Image (spheres, helix red, strand yellow):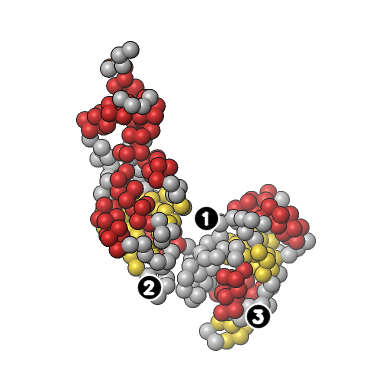
Amino acid sequence: MSFTALGLRAEAQRIEPGLHVVATPIGNLGDISFRGVRTLAAADAVLAEDTRVTKTLLAHYGISTPLVAYHEHNAAAMRPQLLERLRGGAALALVSDAGTPLISDPGFKLVAEVAAEGLPVTAVPGASAVLAALTVAGLPTDRFFFEGFLPSRTAARRQRIAELGAIPGTLVFFESARRVTETLADLAAVLGPRDAAVARELTKHYETVRRGPLDRLAAEFLAEGPPRGEIVVLVAPPIEGKPVFAETDLDAKIGEAMQRLSVKDAATVVAADTGLPRRQVYARAIELAARNPRQP
């Protein structure tokens, strides 16, 4: 139950039984709180998404707490065992590979089941790639929507972007380095030239933040090729009162789509292309269809 910090060896005070959800660094090993270090040192076990990654963190702080693998492939089998330990009075620390647990990792069901049994769940807050990216993006932060990863296929990705397009807050996405060029192109195609930012390798030596309109960022990344590292993409909210697409252009797009598709399918396709809510496009498509019925 000891740890090393700032070159000094210290004993960790005992922590209360229960599940302790501990945020860990997203890159820079110095970005963990003293409370986080003490909790990891005092826990009976550390539940880690990838024990190899967490082992590096524990070694950096001289912590010898046993590691237990808890990830999406073994979560269903492990939860009953972990709940039994918690019922017996154990203090367990839950971490993810990087950042705050439960954000794009499998910790949610464990926390839900622990809480449902009335067992203690304690947050030990700290680093988060979502919040770190928001603080440096230069985009509105009063309201934001975290989507996580968009679908990998273009059609599904564009449809999801269209569904998110009207949200009155900054959009935050995680994306792989190999797919970020395609994602930026689809964001630009659906949402237009909104202001955006691409944050790469946050808190690490090669941290970069690129800011600008979506169409420009998409063109720059296409010309340069896929980057390396962890990526967070942020997109500004729509400008209040400003239509995403001109009504006359919208009618033309709907009319063209309905020449080859049903009203329902045409609305889906046009919504994905324009970034307008599908219900709005569908209502307009019904009006146009009633005004200009197809000839038998």
**Local crowd size for mark 2, using a 10 Å CA cut-off: few (<14), some (14–19), many (≥20):** few
Q: Can residue 180 be seen in this view?
A: yes
Q: Which of marks 1 and 3 is nearer the N terminus?
A: 3
Q: Which amino acid does label 3 sit on?
A: Ser
Q: Quadrant where the C terminus lies?
A: top left
The quarter holding residue 273 reads top left
Q: Which amino acid does label 1 sit on?
A: Ser
> In this picture, is 13 found above or below 78?
below
- Seen at 40% across and 75% down, the residue is 205
- Seen at 35% across and 43% down, the residue is 165
Q: Dot 1 corresponds to which residue? A: 104
What's the distance in space between the residues labelled 2 and 3, CA to CA?
32 Å
Q: Dot 2 corresponds to which residue? A: 206
The label number, if any, that marks residue 8 in the structure image: none
Q: Is residue 195 visible?
A: no
Q: Where is residue 3 in the image (x, y as percent from the top left)?
A: 62, 80
What's the distance in space between the residues labelled 1 and 3, CA to CA?
30 Å
The quarter holding residue 83 reads bottom right
Is label 1 in contact with label 3 (beta carbons under 8 Å)? no
Q: Where is residue 154 in the image (x, y as percent from the top left)?
A: 40, 45
Q: Which amino acid does label 2 sit on?
A: Tyr
Q: Position of residue 207 (x, y in %)?
A: 37, 70
What's the distance in space between the residues labelled 2 and 1, CA to CA?
23 Å
Q: Quadrant where the N terminus lies?
A: bottom right
- Seen at 39% across and 29% down, the residue is 265
Q: Dot 3 corresponds to which residue? A: 2
